[in-house]
Image (cartoon, rainbow, N blue to C red):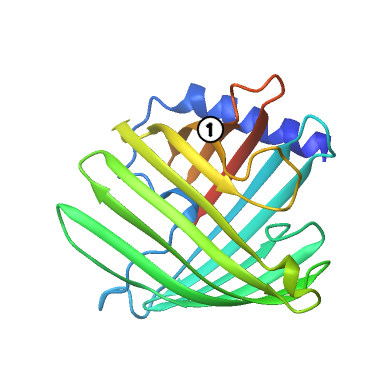
Amino acid sequence: MRSWSIMVAALVLCADRAAGQTPANPPSPAAAAPAASEDAAGTWSFSASVYSYLLPDEGNYGQPTMTADRGWLHLEGRYNYEDLDTGSAWIGYNIGGGDTLAWEVTPMIGGVFGSTDGIAPGAKGSLSWWKLELYSEGEYVFDLGESADSFFYNWSELTIAPVSWLRAGMVTQRTRVYETDRDIQRGILVGFLYKALSFTTYVFNPDDSKPIVVLGAAVTF
């Protein structure tokens, strides 16, 4: 895992140096699903991402996610999201609209299996205006093994993109994958885009003596 984290950090540095080329509009954070449309109804789009968590007092780990979208249909697979050594599979419905104020919402239902077993209703969505974007994804896991372990997970970002290849902003997270003193972790982020690749660095609880660093890399195709 340590070598994986070093590799992602190197990719972030390379993206920073290569950012002089300006592609089209950057994708929504965390590979948000595109809104369904007639033009895209027969076309598949895919994304793959990995987030490397660098924990100061626990073992580091990676959280990969893959998505597939075709029109209204959204399919997604995650690992180490709800718990370590735990996977989840999702199906959702893409809806969206707007021009100046663009929005996308994907309600989903998922199954969780591994160290934690459960059923999870959830949703993800974004709201974009000018150079600002609000993105959020959340789910409630009904634990089938121990109902007292049922839990609400959330990841949210508020960002501004002063240029098309750069975004920065704030991030919050609520998770049980690792232990912290805060129910909701808060942090800052900076991300770079190069063509279909995006690289983002997150720092949670930056006021702590040992903040948590997350390195994210994603590709869309």
Give the residue drawn at x 32%, y 34%.
161
Q: Percent x, y for residue 186? A: 54, 36
Could you tell me which quadrant the N terminus lies in?
Answer: top right
Q: Percent x, y for residue 194? A: 45, 38
* Name of the residue lying farthest toward the front: 148
Q: Can the viewer see residue 53 in this picture?
A: yes
Where on the picture, by quarter, is residue 107?
A: bottom left
Q: Horizontal placement of 102 versus 109: left or right?
A: left
Q: Horizontal placement of 107 versus 5: left or right?
A: left
Q: Percent x, y for residue 72? A: 37, 78
* Name of the residue lying farthest toward the left: 100
Q: Horizontal placement of 60 versus 102: left or right?
A: right
Q: Percent x, y for residue 37? A: 27, 74
Give the residue drawn at x 70%, y 41%.
52
Residue designated by label 1: 187
Between 128 and 65, the one nearer to me in the picture: 128
